[in-house]
Amino acid sequence: MSELDGAESGIFALAERKMAWLDVRQKQLAENIANADTPDYRARDVAPFSSVLDQFNIAPVRTSPLHLAGFSLSPPGTTQTIAERAPDGNAVGLEDEMTKVGKGETDQALVGNLWKTYMGMFMTALGKN
């Protein structure tokens, strides 16, 4: 049992799941791009990460009476836009897919930095720099 096992149920588990989701999504986007010239191929995507977040029961907490009370908005519905179809029936929009890939890379860097920061804080708290 490592010193950080208790932390695995919180921010580390969430970061790990986000990275796994991003990996699956990047693979799907790569498949879409690879099939950009395949007749009748339609771009696919994975379920939004918000469905994974629902398992964590994350809710804002009001820690001081001076804080403003929060409110929840129902998440907007997901819409799927279909790219223009080529004469062969292909509906992959390369620009859209590349934009999603770029966003995925940015998200991976963000999650990696958060992981590194939290690990640094835990190591500092344990006196192990």
Image (cartoon, grey):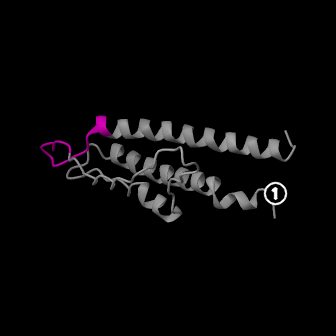
Q: Which kind of residue does numbered mark 1 sit on?
A: Glu
At which x and y percent is residue 19? 55, 50
At x 12%, y 43%, the residue is 87
For the N terminus, the quadrant is: bottom right
Q: Position of residue 77 (x, y in %)?
A: 27, 54
Q: Is residue 123 magenta?
A: no
Prevailing secondary structure class for the magenta stretch in the rendered image: loop
> Residue 84 in magenta?
yes
Q: Which residue is mark 1?
A: 3
User: Residue 112 appears at what percent x and percent y?
Assistant: 61, 41
Q: Residue furthest right?
A: 127
Q: In what quadrant of the picture does the C terminus appear?
A: top right
Q: Could you say which is closer to the camera, residue 119 or residue 34?
A: 119
Q: Is residue 61 above or below residue 101?
A: below
Q: Considering only vertical position in the picture, is 95 above or below 49?
A: above
Q: Secondary structure at mark 1?
A: loop
- Counting the numbered discs, the total is 1
Q: Residue at x 74, y 42 (%)?
A: 121
Q: Position of residue 66 (x, y in %)?
A: 53, 44
Furthest toward the left, the residue is 87
Residue 95 shown left or right of residue 117 in the figure: left
Q: Is residue 121 left or right of residue 94?
A: right
In this rendered view, identify the residue nearer to me: 42 or 116.
116
Span highlighted in magenta in the image? 83-96
Front one among 56 and 16: 56
Given the current orientation, which residue lies at the most extreme front position? 65
Q: Is residue 111 left or right of residue 121?
A: left
- For the point 65% across and 61% down, the residue is 9
For disc 1, the neighbor class at 10 Å (few under 14, some 14 to 19, many from 20) is few
